[in-house]
Image: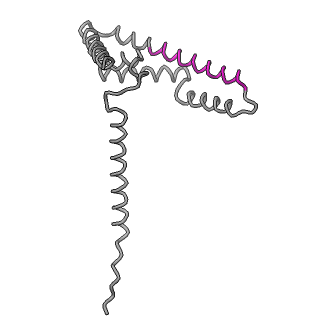
Amino acid sequence: MADATKPKTPLWMRLTLFVSIALNVLVVGAIAGFLLMGGPDRRSDRDRFDFGAFYMRALSEQDQRALRRDFVSGLQKEGRDRGAFIADLRATLDTLRATPFDAEAFEAALADQSRARAEREDMGRAILANRVATMTDAERAAYADRIEDRLTELAKRIRR
């Protein structure tokens, strides 16, 4: 009687199959998430109605990169880079976890974070104004046209 045992599948083949299935699941999940969130036309209201984001997206890609570079440089000069942001949030977490809870300390932390955000907005506004001031008349007119196009599109989406 012949041995009816099936030969074992090589390890490399099993691993390849597992990786392939995992990648397929990731791709399907990403597409499903994208579609469930409404696709590229759906943005949060905060994003839609944020003046800074509205003006920023109307800039050329070159201008957007320059503004981001100037903004990050400004934050670093003031010691308000991402590291400081994370440190502030961690300190606030410590306040939240403290027993007894100190509501005044928590409110003070939120106020400090609001002031820091306002300072970042002020810096962003100044950087944007300076960038627009360096544009030629034609560049500024094209920028205004892109803003108007975005505004028209936003108004259409709101009416739906």
Give x and y (percent) for residue 101.
Answer: 72, 29
Q: Residue at x 64, y 22 (%)?
A: 109
Give x and y (percent) for residue 154.
Answer: 32, 17
Residue 88's quadrant in the figure? Answer: top right
Q: Quadrant of the N terminus?
A: bottom left
Give x and y (percent) for residue 159.
Answer: 31, 17
Identity of the residue furthest to the top in this view: 137
Identity of the residue furthest to the bottom in this view: 1
Judge whether residue 159 is colored magenta: no
Judge whether residue 109 is colored magenta: yes
Q: How is the image coloured?
A: one colour
Q: Horizontally, is 132 left or right of 107 in the view?
A: left
Residue 125's quadrant in the figure? Answer: top left
Quick check: 125 above or below 65? Answer: above
- From which residue to which does the magenta span run? 102-124
Q: Residue at x 43, y 21 (%)?
A: 46
- Please count the marks in the image: 0
**Observer-nearest of 146 and 159:** 159
Q: Quadrant of the C terminus?
A: top left
Give x and y (percent) for residue 146.
Answer: 27, 15
The prevailing secondary structure element of the residues shown in magenta is helix
Q: Residue at x 39, y 10 (%)?
A: 130
Quick check: 88 above or below 1? Answer: above
Residue 14's quadrant in the figure? Answer: bottom left
